[in-house]
Structure formats: C-alpha cells, structure tokens
DNA sequence: CAGTGGTCTAGACCACGCC
DNA sequence: GCGTGGTCTAGACCACTGA
C-alpha cells in the first residue's frame, strides 16, 4: 500500500487523507470526487476500504453519494443548512424557515472572551452583524453574529447577506460549518431589543449562545440571540 | 437464504429481525448476543451482512461490542444515560451529574393532551412525579414527570426512585429510552415553584418539555421542567 | 451501453479477552 | 490456544444514471 505504515487502520488513514483534501479545497462544494475504483487504485487499497471511509464521511455530512452518478461534496443549501441548525418550531410542529432582516454591520476589535473562543490574537478585528429574524411574518429572534476578519475578509463589504449565512461562508470563504454548540438560558429581555421583538423590556426570553465549527475543527463564528417564546420553541431531538 | 424474499436489502431485514428480538426482550440488557458466525449461520447469510446490521445497531446505541468478548445489549447505566440526555452544564464547562430529591408521587387520570402525546385511551391512569434536581448542591431544576401506568405498572409503589429514571425503566419495566425530544422556551417561574428553586416568582426560567421514546418507537414518558439559568445552561451540540 | 454506487459473499489475517 | 470482534481484500451481481 502506498499509504504511510501508521498505527491507524487503513480506512482511517484514507478518511484523514480525503478529509484533508476536502478541507484544503481540493474539491469544491457540489463537485464530484473520483470514483471508488479510481481512489482505490490511486491509494493502493481495495475498493471496500475506500467505501468505508467515504461512508463515514457521508455519515458526518461531509459528502453525498448518488447511486449511478458519483460522490459529491456536501452542499450547504439554504434548506439543508437551515433544517439542520435552525431549531425553531411551533410547539409540536414542523420546521420553519425564517426571514431575515439585517439591522447593522460594524467592524471592531474582538473582546477578550471572543479572542479566546475564536482563537484570535489579542485585538484582532471582527465583524459584528445584528439581524432580526422573522417566523411567520412576526419578529421573533434578534441575533448578534461575530465573525473574525481573518476568516472572512471584508465580509462587512458584502452587499447581499443571505438568509443562511452558512451558504455564504461556504461559497465565498471556503468555510463549511459541520457542527454547532448551543448554550441556552432564560433571561430578561434587554431594553435595547424590546422594540424589535414587540415585547416589553425584561420579558422572559430564551438566550442562545452559539459557537459554529468549521470542517477543520476551528470555531469560526459566535452568535448570541434573544428570542421570544410565546409562539415558537427551540426544539431538539437527542439520540 | 432463510429470510423472507422481501424488497429490502438483506442487512436491513437482519437489522429488523434483531431489533424485533431485542424489543421483545429476547436478550436482556448487558447480556451477550450470539456471535456473528452463529447469527450468520442461523439466518443463512454471510458474516459480513450480520456485521453490517450489528454495526448499525451499535450506531443507534442499541448494542455495544467488545473486541475479543462479544456483542452486548446496551446498558443504560446511571452515567451513560445521564451523559446522553442530561444537558445541563456550567457555561463553557463539562457535564454535570445531578442529585435528585423526590417531592411527591401521585396517581391520576391522564389529561387529553397527555392521552394524545402518550397514545392512551381516554382517562387512562398515569403517575405524576415531582422532583427537585440539584447541581453542585444547589436546587436548580424542578421537574414534573408523567408516566402511563400501563407501561409502568405500580411504578408509584417503588420505594427507591433512582437518580436516573431510565435505568429503573430498563431494569424493571423493559423500557429502553433511545431518544428524547425537547422543546425549550423561556417563561416566568410559576409562583408555586419559587420557593423550591430559591428564586422569586416570575423570575425568567427555562422551561423544557420532553417526550421520551422507547426502543419500539412509542412515547412512554412526558416531562416538564423549570430551571433557573444564572449558573447553569442547557448545552447541546448539533451535527 | 458503460460507469457509478449499493449489496453480498468468502476468506484471510489481526487484536483482544480469557482459560 | 481458542473464540470473539476488527480490518482488509477480491470479486460477483444488482440498481441507477446518462450518453
């Protein structure tokens, strides 16, 4: 076999190699990878070993396979991305698609906490976006997003911020968000946001702090949001 | 092959068969299943096909495999069960293990909403438990649990309610919770719970409504809890 | 029709647990 | 040493896609 005689099983080595190529942008989103046979031949392993690696990557939402066609880099479409990471529902109900209004965009130095969470050098520049999200035409969530400029150069100069930022991240900046960590608490609505959500100041709201993780494992985005929960709930299934 | 000539792939048929056996209590928790070879011979398929089915069941937390020993029915130990489904953490911190104090147990007819959620005949009997959960010696969560008596006969007569109900469910009632659905909202703390949590009435608290799903797909438990979030947060990773 | 992924088999060898 | 699960291979056949 042409792979290094490491201590890891072959399929794991193949997985690491293919993931590295993916991270480095060797293949673009929605592009096909070489076929199983081609990869097996190139890497000097059997087709079954390549298959095991590819299937693991499919399980992690890195790839998609279509019988008769090929293996493709997973695409963060508006729908799939929102469906996976947008957890707001009507109680007992189906998934919802939010509308989004951009309120402000600014550039500033990162706070100490942000530097730590995003692994930045002190005083590195970040962009802060404030967005208001609507569910069924009602303003429900106000969201502050923080993005490091070294990851998203000049993102504050974008003139079209899409509904799902993750598609923009993937298409323009080569960032593929593969997982997010949410921390939820209840708190009193800060007075400055009250008018946006049509709620009284100090109304109980759900506050979510999210860290978004790129395919290479780096935390590349922080967000903090406040949501009224009279009509909608944060819904999650644990398995 | 001795399996029905259905339209499903073989490994799926094997998976269904083994899952059915598991649901029916053919093997008890922490008991070993027959070896791959034995199952393959019994079912008239190859070892690789059995392996694929077993690995899928492992991925769904139904089984555990130990190299050199065998394949075992997954056990809901206090730790593993809590680790999977108990989502409270210190902000940015590690998982916590709660202490639990049972406040009351009572038997009553199910409400209409409960009948619908738990698929019960009208006016079926349920047990309602009220529990106070402590994190780091502080009372943080007050939880109302509703269990149908047809699933958990005489559970209100248990004299030792463990920290994790799920272990009790598995050991005494043959119920294996494989997934839960949580709906979270912020609300004002009901006055009747204020003293338990050492908070003022109407303080903003995180309310969680949980449906717990048995291995056979049935919703077998509902719970509703209120939690103060000054020191602790509900933390979840989406992938 | 050729090329792709999906399923299934049979068999080899390895790593681990236990007697 | 034996039985278990874990890895890897080689090859057959099927199902789907698109030229």
Image (spheres, coloured by chain):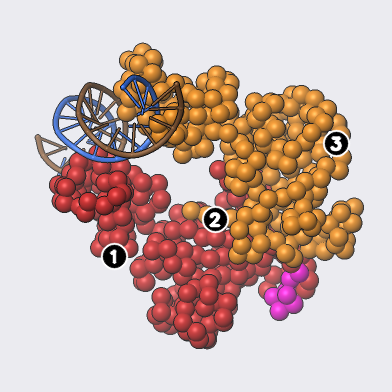
Chain colours: A orange, B red, C blue, D brown
Using the rendered image of the protein, determine whether residue B127 is visible from the camera's viewpoint.
no
Magenta portion: prevailing SS class: helix
Q: Quadrant of the N terminus of chain A?
A: top left
- Residue at image point 27% right, 60% down: B21
Q: Which residue is at 54% across, 55% downward? A: A237
Q: Chain of mark 3?
A: A
> Residue B130, how many percent across, how many down?
58, 76
Please give left or right for residue A191 compared with residue B88 in the image.
Answer: right
Give yes or no for residue B193 being in the magenta stretch.
yes
Per the image, the residue denoted by label 2 is: A237
Query: Could you say which disc has been placed on residue B81 in the image?
Result: none
Could you tell me how far apart the alpha carbons at marks 3 and 2 are, in whole angstroms? Answer: 33 Å
Magenta residues span B188-195
| Same-chain check, marks 3 and 2 | yes
- Using the image as rendered, state which of residue A174 and residue A101 is in the foreground: A101
Question: Relative to B239, is C7 on the left or the right?
Answer: left
Question: Marks 1 and 3, Cα distance to the nearest angstrom?
Answer: 58 Å
To which quarter of the image does residue D13 belong?
A: top left
Which residue is labeled 3 in the image?
Answer: A105
The residue shown at (78%, 56%) is A137
* Residue B109 left/right relative to C18: right
Label 2's element? strand
Q: CA distance from mark 1 to mark 2?
A: 25 Å
Residue B180: x and y in percent read: 51, 60
Instruction: Classify residue A211 as left or right of residue B29.
Output: right
Q: Is residue A61 visible?
A: yes
Classify A168 as above or below B81: above
Q: Is residue A149 above or below residue B209?
A: above
Please tell me the numbered disc located at residue B25.
1
Per the image, label 3 sits on a secondary structure element best described as strand
Chain ID at mark 1: B
Q: Report crowding for label 3: few under 14, some 14 to 19, many 20 or more residues within 10 A (C-alpha).
A: some
């Amino acid at each position: 076999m042409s792979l290094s005689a490491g201590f890891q099983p072959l399929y794991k080595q193949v997985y690491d190699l293919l993931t590295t190529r993916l991270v480095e942008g060797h293949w673009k989103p929605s592009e096909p990878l070489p076929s199983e046979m081609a990869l097996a031949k190139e890497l000097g392993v059997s087709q079954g070993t390549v298959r095991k690696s590819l299937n693991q990557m499919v399980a992690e939402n890195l790839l998609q396979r279509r019988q008769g066609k090929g293996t493709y880099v997973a695409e963060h479409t508006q729908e799939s991305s929102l469906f996976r990471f947008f957890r707001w529902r009507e109680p007992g109900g189906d998934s919802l698609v939010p509308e989004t209004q951009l309120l402000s965009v600014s550039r500033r130095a990162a706070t100490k906490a942000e530097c730590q969470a995003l692994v930045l050098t002190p005083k590195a520049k970040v962009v802060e976006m404030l967005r208001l999200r609507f569910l069924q035409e009602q303003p429900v969530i106000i969201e502050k997003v923080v993005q490091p400029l070294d990851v998203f150069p000049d993102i504050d100069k974008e003139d079209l911020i899409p509904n799902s930022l993750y598609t923009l991240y993937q298409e323009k900046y080569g960032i593929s968000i593969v997982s997010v960590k949410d921390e939820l608490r209840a708190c009193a609505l800060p007075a400055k946001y009250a008018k946006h959500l049509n709620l009284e100041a100090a109304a109980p709201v759900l506050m979510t702090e999210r860290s978004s993780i790129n395919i290479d494992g780096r935390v590349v985005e922080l967000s903090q949001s406040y949501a009224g929960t009279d009509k909608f709930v944060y819904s999650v299934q644990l398995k």
